[in-house]
Image (cartoon, helix red, strand yellow):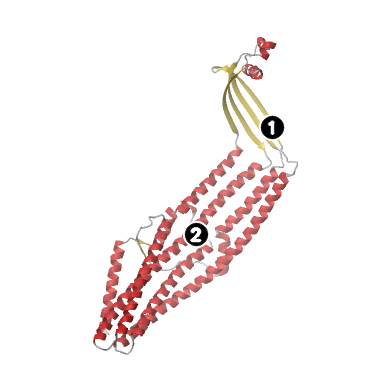
Amino acid sequence: MMRYLTTKAMCVAAILTAAAGSAEAQPLLTLADAIRESLAHNASLRAGRSTVDEAQAGVDEARAGWLPRVTVSELWQRGNQPVFVFSALLSARQFGVANLAIDALNHPDPIGAFRTSIGVEQLLFDGGRQRATVAMASLRHDMAGFVLDETTAALLIQTTETYGRVLTAESGQRAAIAARDAMRQDRVRTEQRRDAGVATDADVMALAAQVANLEQRVLQHQADAAVARAELNRLVGAEIDRDYAVAEPNAAVRTAATELRALLADADANRVELKRSTAAIRLAEADARRERATLLPQLAVQGVVDVSGTRLADRASNWVVGGEARWSLSLGGAEAARLRAARARRAQAQAHADDIRAAVHVEVATAFYQRRSAEARQVAGGAAVDQARESERVLRDRFEAGLATVTDVLAASSAVLAAETQRLSAAVDLLMNDARLWRAVGRMVPTREAVQ
């Protein structure tokens, strides 16, 4: 018994020394650090922010329709076309009596004409078309922001899950290393017992096979950790081969509300998919208002000032002011058809919003019950580890006394490894179910300013 404890202590000390050396060489990346880095550097979020900026530019463009439109042009022409020569001379206030001669009118000498024109047009009334256009642009901007929020929430979930994969793989690797080293010590003792005639070659071979199996598990966990770490590096916007150590969070995040009904109410108020579907309904309504406005006339005032002359430095000024009423209707009923289509899109958006709300409620209920199950599994996993370790200790004592076989020792060691894997899996599941529940009720997204 004392020899077993001494050997076990040496194995544990070796593992802790190796882990300490590894942690010293690798910087520690906590889950909170990974989330902060993903919010700051993830490429998909950068693309989403650019989409929001583009939508804001669309709002500014739509609002510009309220202001006057100015057109400036500078024109030079030369020719002997009669109408051109007549109008050019008249605009330049250089038309004389000689220019009224029939021959001069029919066969004028070629001249050059300069014209600078500045025109202003201000829309006075369009039946609400411009107002609807601005509202639609603002709603598209809001929807782009909601899409960014959805992308952020999905990224945080993916970052948490990938961090959990790294944690699971590295913890599994450490557990497999501990079991492998302990099994190597068992093989050495069994070889000594075989030499003493109290064990067989089959016992030694069984332990050697288990050591090889555990070595394979160590390598598999190492590969899984490398793949998960590369994926996490992609999510946080780091170099794919960046190395770091991870740590199991001290405690899972807890939601403030424990009743399902309260969580459903939170989802109705906070879930970005529901906000986006509501914005889609309002967008369809604004589209219908714009189509109705096409049935009404547009009224605008205009003013033009031009400076014309046959020489660049010698010109005469002219001005024109006026108003315009425009009313364009299709005799085939195109405007009425577009209005019906806009109303159908509004009904479609409402039906889609109802479906999204039902799906969100199912997601909240699923996350709520899965989290409760994960919490129970975590408690059971801790108890299973304690029971498996105690059983292994008893069986090793019996093996030392010659009352248990190598098969019993192998089974006990495998049970400890399985229980430890189950405990860690339950802890990671609880962490991820917490994140999924927060995501389901709409609390997973930080403020927009935090992701800028």
Label at residue 154 = 2
Label at residue 109 = none
Give how far across and how far down residue 290 sits, in percent. Answer: 66, 45
Taking 147 as reference, is 331 above or below it? above
In the current view of this chain or complex, which residue is farthest to the bottom? 403
Q: Is residue 59 left or right of residue 123?
A: left
Q: Nearer the viewer, residue 327 or 330?
A: 330
Residue positioned 61% across, 38% down in the render: 66
Real-space Cα separation, disc 2 to disc 1, in angstroms: 52 Å
In the structure shown, which secondary structural element does the residue marked by tag 2 occupy? helix
Disc 1 residue type? Glu
State which quadrant residue 183 falls in: bottom left
Please name the residue that numbered disc 1 is placed on. 324
Q: Is residue 160 left or right of residue 307?
A: left
Taking 445 as reference, is 400 above or below it? below
Q: Nearer the viewer, mark 2 or mark 1?
A: 2
Disc 2 residue type? Ala
Q: Nearer the viewer, residue 300 or 241?
A: 241
State which quadrant residue 364 falls in: bottom right
Q: Earlier in the sequence, mark 2 or mark 1?
A: 2
Q: Quadrant of the N terminus?
A: bottom left
Q: Nearer the viewer, residue 198 or 385?
A: 198
Q: In this orientation, does residue 298 appear?
A: yes
Residue positioned 35% across, 73% down in the render: 176
Give how far across and how far down residue 116 sits, in percent. Answer: 57, 23
In the structure shown, which secondary structural element does the residue marked by tag 1 occupy? strand
